[in-house]
Image (spheres, rainbow, N blue to C red):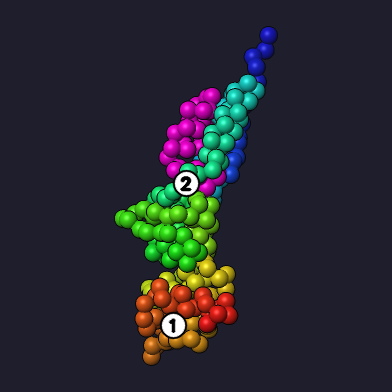
Amino acid sequence: MKPLARRKRAFIVKLPPQAMEDFDKFMERLSKAIAGDPVLMKFKDGYLRVEVYGGEVLARRTKEGIKKVLQEFKAEPKRGTLRVTRQSIYREAGVAIPLDAMETVLRLQGYDTRIEGDEVYTSAPAGAVFEAARLIAEYLREAGNLYATRTAKRLVITAGALTGASILELIDAGLEIGVLEEDDEGKLLVPGDWREAVKKLVKHLAGEG
């Protein structure tokens, strides 16, 4: 009798926001749920690839284990304050983003939010937090070569995440209403508090200013 066929099986899953928020706990639960020793567990851009080596029975048990853990983490988050670590934000965004920009975005979206060390505490659901992180990261990359002070870049990426306007539109509007200025060398700067400038710029782009 020939031995049962054994081969490498790969499972690729999209991680829910709740799993991203508590990534270490998710990985611990997943490791226990997988029936065999994983050959590879690799995370990238919100997706986890799990590879196991074995037959059909092992592959089925592994698939069921992954499904069970995903269902646990897709459950509605508990009401109250959500704690999000800098590390989990980095995993979702793919780049280190300024936490004060995230704090400002979430506050202007109506969520109670504060920063304590490397953690963000907010009334926002996990999905809103990580969507804000992805948007900020996108604008951060686009503004990488912008000739501007740190606060001017902070203004642009935060207002961009809130409005969806292009970098050029944000700069033009900022200069128009005076929340952005250029020095003698053409470098962009914020003459006042950048958070207040974000509020004014967002209102202006919404036609309210």
Residue range corresponding to the magenta coloring: 15-41
Circle 1 is placed at which residue position?
179
Residue 6: name its quadrant: top right
For residue 76, side relative to residue 3 (left or right): left
**Residue 8 spot, x, y in % from top left:** 60, 30
Q: Nearer the viewer, mark 2 or mark 1?
A: 2
In this rendering, the answer to whether 26 lies above or below 209 is: above
Q: Quadrant of the N terminus?
A: top right
Which residue is more in the foreground, 19 or 52?
19
In this rendering, the answer to whether 124 lies above or below 100 is: above
Instruction: Report if residue 26 lies within the magenta region.
Output: yes
Identify residue type, mark 2. Answer: Arg
Q: Farthest residue in the bottom direction?
A: 184
**Residue 84 spot, x, y in % from top left:** 42, 50
Identify residue type, mark 1. Answer: Val
Secondary structure, mark 2, is loop
Q: Farthest residue in the right direction?
A: 1
Q: Residue at x 46, y 60 (%)?
A: 111
Q: Farthest residue in the left direction?
A: 117
Circle 2 is placed at which residue position?
79
**Residue 161 spot, x, y in % from top left:** 52, 67
Instruction: Report if residue 123 lies within the magenta region.
Output: no
Which residue is more in the foreground, 163 or 12?
163
Q: Assess disc 1: are there few (<14), some (14-19) or many (≥20) residues with their C-alpha within 10 Å of its C-alpha.
A: many
Residue 153 in sight? no
Q: Residue at x 63, y 25 (%)?
A: 60
Q: Residue at x 63, y 21 (%)?
A: 57
